[in-house]
Amino acid sequence: MRSVLVLGTSSGAGKTTLCAVLCRALARKGMSVAPFKASNLSLNSYACQDGGEIGMGQAFQAWACGMEPESDMNPVLLKPAGNGVIQLVRGGRPYRDISRDSPMTKEETVPTVRECFGRLSASHDIVVCEGSGSPVELNLMDRDIANVGLMRELGIPAILVGDIERGGVFAAIYGTWRLIPEDLRPQLKGFIINRFRGDGSILKEGIDRIEELTGMKCLGVMPYRFLRLPEEDSMSSSEGKLEGSDVRSAFMFNLDEMTDAFLESGLDIEEVVRISESSA
Amino acid sequence: MDCIKKKVNEEIAAGWKGSDLSCEYHPCHFKGQDCTFCYCPFYPCEDEDLGSFIVGRRGEKIWSCTECLLIHRTEACRFLMSEVKRLGIENAEDSRLRGLFPEFKRRFFKIGRATMVVGATSDAGKSVTVAAICRILMRRGVLCSPFKSQNMSLNSKVTRNGSEIAMIQTLQAQAAGLTAPDHHMNPILLKPKADTTSQVIVCGKPFADYDVEHYYGEFVPGPGREIVKEHVDFLKRHYDMVIMEGAGSPAEINIYDKDIANMRAAEIADANVILVVNVEWGGSFAYAVGTVELIPEEDRRRIKGIILNNVRGDPERMRSGADRLEEVLGIPVIGIIPHADVVLPSEDSEALRGKTGSGEGNAVIGVVRFPRIANFTDLDPLALEDVRIRYVESPADLEGVDAVILPGTKNTVRDYLWMVERGIRDKVVSLKGKVPILGICGGYQMMGTVLDDSKAFEGGTSQVLDGLGFFDMDTVFGEYSKKISNDTGRLLAGDGGTVTGYELHMGMSESREKPLFELDRMFAKVLPTDGSYREEDMTFGTYLHGCLDTPAFRKYFLSFIKGIKTESGSEVADYTSVLEENLDKLADVFEANMDIDRLMAILEGRA
């Protein structure tokens, strides 16, 4: 079983895009790839052929893998319904409404996450998992199932993606590593710096220092580009331009260009494959 | 000199009077200033802590102390006047008056304390935090000044003595109750020009253009550090407190030793440091821990408090995380600040990233979003009106707009070519006469017939371009020089009215159109004019940044939009007073959500 989990240092760091690019690049190598996101907070969902409902991001990533979206790719989908009420869609089906007084419990989600992931990993060469938000929100961490929860439950190795555009990317990467529970830190294998503009050599000193401090390996510095995605969540803004009439093929054309750009910029896909082999 | 002595005699005779609210210039230095001695009885004290000699027009040495505030502090005035009365001094020539100076200075001259606010990222909320702290201090009667050693921004303003500094420091100065911000508050301003070069403004004047490599390789290790020291020391001599703002993240470890905007500046000023983290994007705890721990130990010890900023929803939900953060770092979280819904100008164009517009009014104003858009705070007063701003990046974005604004740009020629290439230029031309079109500064230059860059100052290659052709006007980019002025004047169109603003531009224009504004100039026989307009075409252009701040021109321009209601907003809204209210609101939010005792301990150096 091979799998890798992509964690972001913040919302909008580029997780969804990076996962799509990884899916695309791995599929091009002839691997059978499946996307997975344990828990997704989004109003944009997609109806799969199996009748289940999943987040739009995973549907997109499924297309990137050259396959049709399936319910297993997003076992928990949280759809804000207003007034602090959130609809919990579990395993593709509406399950119940959650609220502050009746929060979601790990007991009702973790088994589904395990089952869905198990089926996907059994039927594919590799599963590319996407985390949710930042994995180290100290006020939320103990309830997490999409980030450290997934690392712990399923032993999946992880890579971090940080957005350099806002500044403070070294702090974000180091700080995230530092706040991950110590016993899980060895599962953090690499990091990627996203949305960089200019001459990458200026970063070298910083990258070396982070590698030395954390033992994680830098898997690439990605260029400033925006992928046109079906809107993933309210925080992100997709600025890429779409061309062509068939929306889905236009998305894929755009993704292919982006994948080429990432690989040209040195995205270390071989290392990602090696990392995925350390899955428990 | 005799004139000053005579004034001082009058002041002594009048006795202590406190703030003179009846004076038309009040407050000429700061809110709550004491006006007993409008003219300093110790002039010229020739004390180097308080002023310096400058060279006058005829080459003579003149003692200059325009920035000294000591004689406008109430307690100082009370002391001095009571001594004057006690000794029976009645005349400025009395040598005993000068004899009071040493004791006066000993009692009231102090070197102020500096505190620095750094952010874990850009847009963390550093500048609003500085503004909030300045306002909190002002309300407590503390005389404080903002400071940012190095600011990269295309939003700048002109000070009273004609220096160019970042707009945000002038706003922070307003928060501190200061009337006349000056170049000490932002001695280095970087204005991005092309992709990798910036115009560097030092002490308010254009210095040179640098690319990133040479800026960090030559400027910073050369004059940079000294400039920071000189000006922060200056402010510490004149204010009780200096609230410094960092730039970007202080933990960019790849350039740490070359960064004079963050921890180096804190070291130079011997400042305590407060770290602000924006919670909105998530990952705030990681950003906080990473920032603190990547800063080397000798600098890290300066960090005395953390502010979690911009929390949406209930701030209490962050509490357990904040407690954990304190445990990990051993640094207190001194505030969990909810998102403050205030109308304040945004600092740099990064804040526009991903935004397609703002406002909720009925009339749609298309604002061309130039790649090098500058001084877009010009548009902020429109938030007071029944309009909605839509940023225009393609011709389609101009469909159905009720008005068009071409804002300022750092590079008129390159941005004009961008507009041509995107097809926006032709679309704007087709709208002439259909909807009102306003050009400000660079946008105004584009409205003329000719943009002459034959010396290649703007575009990098020699070229002469046809402009939009709305006005019979030529603009020539003739030399590396810049027009900088701070203006008040009158609208010459419509019902007239007062306008205030400032000019900042490379390139000079000659217009053969009706002028839009008449400007005040001291000692001028013929008052200069600015701008052009053609009512029949509904085209308006001006060099004056800030022209929409006062209601007169804003109301006039908007009156050309069919069906707009301008009465409500425009009647009342002078933008400066709107900012004033919002600064108070901002300070209220911070006060209510911060441990003020802890904050004061940090500011006073007790933490």
Image (cartoon, helix red, strand yellow):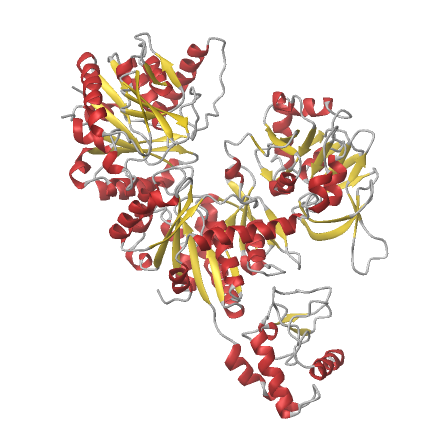
Is B155 rendered above or below residue A153? Answer: below
Residue A43: % across, % down: 40, 22
Residue B6 appears left or right of B420: right
Q: Quadrant of the N terminus of chain B?
A: bottom right
Q: What residue is at 22 percent from the left and 41 percent from the top?
A: A214
Residue B530 appears left or right of A79: right
Res. A267 visible in picture: yes
Res. B453 visible in picture: no
Q: To which quarter of the image does residue A134 belong?
A: top left
Give whichever of B67, B17 is nearer the camera: B17
Give whichever of B97, A253 is nearer the camera: B97
Residue B427: % across, % down: 68, 22
Q: What residue is at 75 percent from the left and 44 percent from the top?
A: B552
Q: Work out which residue is located at the far right of the displayed protein and give it.
A: B525
Q: What residue is at 66 percent from the left and 72 percent from the top?
A: B35
Residue B4 appears left or right of B192: right
Is B275 rendered above or below residue B357? Answer: below
Give whichever of B8, B75 is nearer the camera: B75
Q: Work out which residue is located at the far front of the displayed protein and give it.
A: A101
Residue B132: % across, % down: 50, 54
Figure disc tally: 0
Residue B250: % across, % down: 38, 50
Q: Quadrant of the C terminus of chain B?
A: bottom left
Q: What residue is at 17 percent from the left and 26 percent from the top?
A: A154
Is A216 rendered above or below residue A31? Answer: below
Residue B30 appears left or right of B518: left
